[in-house]
Amino acid sequence: MTLLLDTHVALWAIAGDANLGEEFLDRLRHDPDIFLSSVSLWEIAIKQTTGKLAGPADLVERVRDMGFRELPVTHAHAIAAGRLPLHHRDPFDRMLVAQAVTEGLTLVSRDASIALYDVDVLKA
């Protein structure tokens, strides 16, 4: 199963957070088929700028450099995100759902609202 990380999961991964469990953290360190969306980096940068997320000034670069595969936003992703039902109002999460659906990825998240969509989810 090829994974796409929700932003909070990527942040937990960089911190080695026990919420993820040692086995999953080990997978994150070694599995080459784990994607990180450019949307997550954008979300981190915005939250840091607005003071909603603490951390070092280069946090977004540190997350980017963790070695996950890059998933850029495409036209298809934008169209799919815009057409999703409004189960979730967060535009970052809606884009992650659209990317997972469009690319056939499993979205790793702890956000209960994500499960309202027709998307494969692995609960973190």
Image (cartoon, rainbow, N blue to C red):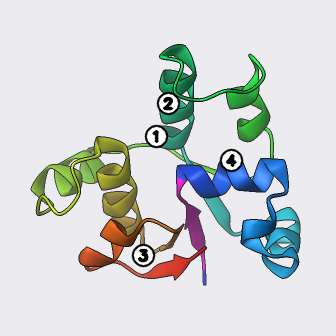
Instruction: Choose the circle earlier in sequence order: 1 or 4.
Output: 4
The foreground one among 103 and 38 is: 38
Q: Secondary structure at mark 2?
A: helix
Type of the residue with mark 3: Gly
Q: Secondary structure at mark 1?
A: helix
x then y, percent, for residue 83:
11, 57
Residue visible at 53% across and 57% down in the picture: 6
Relative vertical location of residue 85 with respect to residue 64 in this rendering, above or below: below
Q: Are marks 3 and 2 in contact (CB under 8 Å)?
A: no
Task: Give the label, 2 or 4, closer to the camera.
Answer: 4
Q: Which mark is residue 11?
A: 4
Q: Is residue 22 left or right of residue 90?
A: right
Q: Residues within 10 Å of mark 1 (few under 14, many from 20)?
A: many
Instruction: Choose the circle earlier in sequence order: 4 or 3.
Output: 4
Task: Give the label, 3 or 2, closer to the camera.
Answer: 2
Type of the residue with mark 2: Trp
Is residue 66 highlighted in magenta? Answer: no
Q: Which mark is residue 42?
A: 2
x then y, percent, for residue 62:
79, 33
Q: Residues within 10 Å of mark 4 (few under 14, many from 20)?
A: some
Task: Give the label, 1 or 4, closer to the camera.
Answer: 4
Residue occupied by mark 3: 104
User: What is the magenta range?
Assistant: 2-6
x then y, percent, for residue 11:
68, 47
Image quarter (top left, top right, bottom left or bottom right) of the C terminus: bottom right
Q: CA distance from mark 2 to mark 4?
A: 13 Å
Q: Secondary structure at mark 3?
A: loop
Type of the residue with mark 1: Val
Q: Which mark is residue 39?
A: 1
Q: Are marks 1 and 3 in contact (CB under 8 Å)?
A: no
